Amino acid sequence: MTNERQTPNPPLWLVMMTAAMAGGMGWGIRGQYGHETGAMIAGVLVSLVLVFLFCPGNSSIHVIRAAALGTIAMGFGGSITYGQTIGLTHDGPLIGNWASLRWGMLGLAIKGGVWIGFAGFFLGVGLGGKRYRPFEMFLLVLGMLTAVVVGWWLFNSPHDPENKRLPQLLGFPTYFSDHWKWEPGVELKHRPEIWGGLWFALLTGILYATLAKRDGLARNLALWGMLGGALGFPLGQTLQATNAWNPDFFRESFVGGVTRYFNWWNIMETTFGMVMGAVLGLGLWLNRRRVAVSSEPDVSPLPNWLIGLLLALHVSLLTLVEFSSFQWIDFVYDLGLMMGLIPLVACVRGRWWPYLQLLPITLLPIAGKTLRALADPTNPSVSWLAYLILPMLLAVTLAVWFARKAKPAGEHPAFIRSTLLFCTWIYFGLNYAFFGFPWPWEAWGGRTPNAVLFFIAAMGLTLTALFFEPTGRRWQLRAWKKGWD
């Protein structure tokens, strides 16, 4: 077995900075789109940056596969409810309640840790050099889904607010949403939680990778992802809570000229993404000797007819769960792990699926939600063209073109670089439209600061993709031409 590089060693500062940019912009954009598919924006950007820096050849299908696996898994935590957990730290009636603040921050650390832990785990699965067969991945995900039920029963039940019964374990409360203890006499919508089930699922995956596959990178990167999420979510919310607890300072002090324009929720999300991206990058850098991406082709890739069948099924279910109101489809496909079952199985041995996952599959729900939010009833054709048809046409064209350019010696070496550029600007552009085009030279509003931050991040990722050459660990004016000659 030959590897892309025995000891990839990109500069640590560049790894952490670009991963923070990708995570901050991706997670900040996710706030407009929400749930599992929104989180995949951060997944695709962070995963592409990391494989670009740590797999310098970029010519193995396993490199593309690793980025796709990280993208899919970043969506799993989207099943977690966290709005009321955040509320425990900054809602008006709870300002000054330190017990509520501590409980909310603990809940955010628990929920953030499992969310990013999944992304780290599956990115490590892709980069660790261990081969996972399709049926093996199918059984692993089924086992993780079973673990969800066990963990949910153990940590997230009973949930019977009408009879004042909320989840606990051995007498200790395990419920991190708002309830009567924190706001007595207030009528609340008590959210059912699932974080315990997801933790059990993640631990099941880690145990399998460690004991059955001896996959040290998957295990270690999962742990670093947990740390990134457990730090990032509370740190991001600390900024928002500090503003809620000290509004006069942010209105009247020397920082008020800037912070008065902040959308603090989006600032929280952007900070969360920056921290988790930087920590995940640090974790991969510290485990860089475990990166062992094979340059050998698949022995028995899944047949194209089967990939086509799975693609039609997945896209149909994904479209229904995102854009229809059928309760049965939400029951079947709304859980992030269930939504990831088909893509994970198809990615580990399908040659076409990783290309499609990184480009049109991840883009479809984002473009569709942008269209739904911004469609002009007086001129719908322009909206459809700008927000859905053209982005999807470009994504499909890129995926098909690069997949067809693959040779027996490997995939096109410019694919990762080109896809990073495309994803950076397509998601920035769609979100900028969602923001209402907050040009910085016009009157500033609540969207302008984040739009500026996202632009800075997009430029940083663009400069890295164009001018950094990972093989030589140096900046080159014509680095972007590598692979096109």
Image: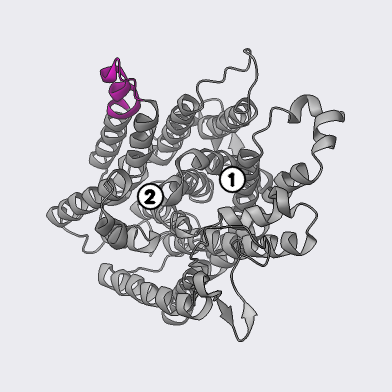
Residue 234 seen in the current view:
yes
x and y, in percent, of residue 172 in the image:
64, 80
Find disc 1 in the rendering and name its residue.
19
Q: Is residue 472 shown above or below 130?
A: above
Q: Quadrant of residue 246?
A: top right
Q: Residue at x 34, y 41 (%)?
A: 365
Q: Disc 1 residue type? A: Ala
Q: Residue reaching furthest right?
A: 253
Give SS at disc 1.
Answer: helix
- The residue closer to the viewer here, 40 or 218, is 40
Task: Please give left or right for residue 185 compared with residue 315 in the image.
Answer: right
Q: In the depicted view, which residue is nearer to us: 434 or 40?
A: 434
On the image, the x and y values in percent for residue 52 come to 49, 45
Q: Residue at x 61, y 64 (%)?
A: 179
- Residue 280 belongs to the span the image colors magenta: no
Q: Is residue 298 left or right of residue 114?
A: left
Q: Out of 226 and 188, give the one closest to the viewer.
A: 188
Could you say where residue 105 lies in the image, as x and y percent from the top left? 69, 60
In which quadrant is the C terminus drawn?
Answer: top left
Residue 56 disc label:
none
Quadrant (top left, top right, bottom left, bottom right) of the N terminus? bottom left
Q: Amino acid at mark 2?
A: Ile
Q: Residue furthest bottom?
A: 170
Q: Main secondary structure of the magenta part?
A: helix
Dots 2, 1 in contact, CB < 8 A: no
* Secondary structure type for disc 2: helix
Q: CA distance from mark 2 to mark 1?
A: 17 Å
The residue at which mark 2 appears reads as 64
N-terminal-most mark, 2 or 1: 1
Tell me the magenta residue range: 375-390
| Closer mark to the observer between disc 2 and disc 1 | 1
Q: How are the colours assigned in the image?
A: one colour
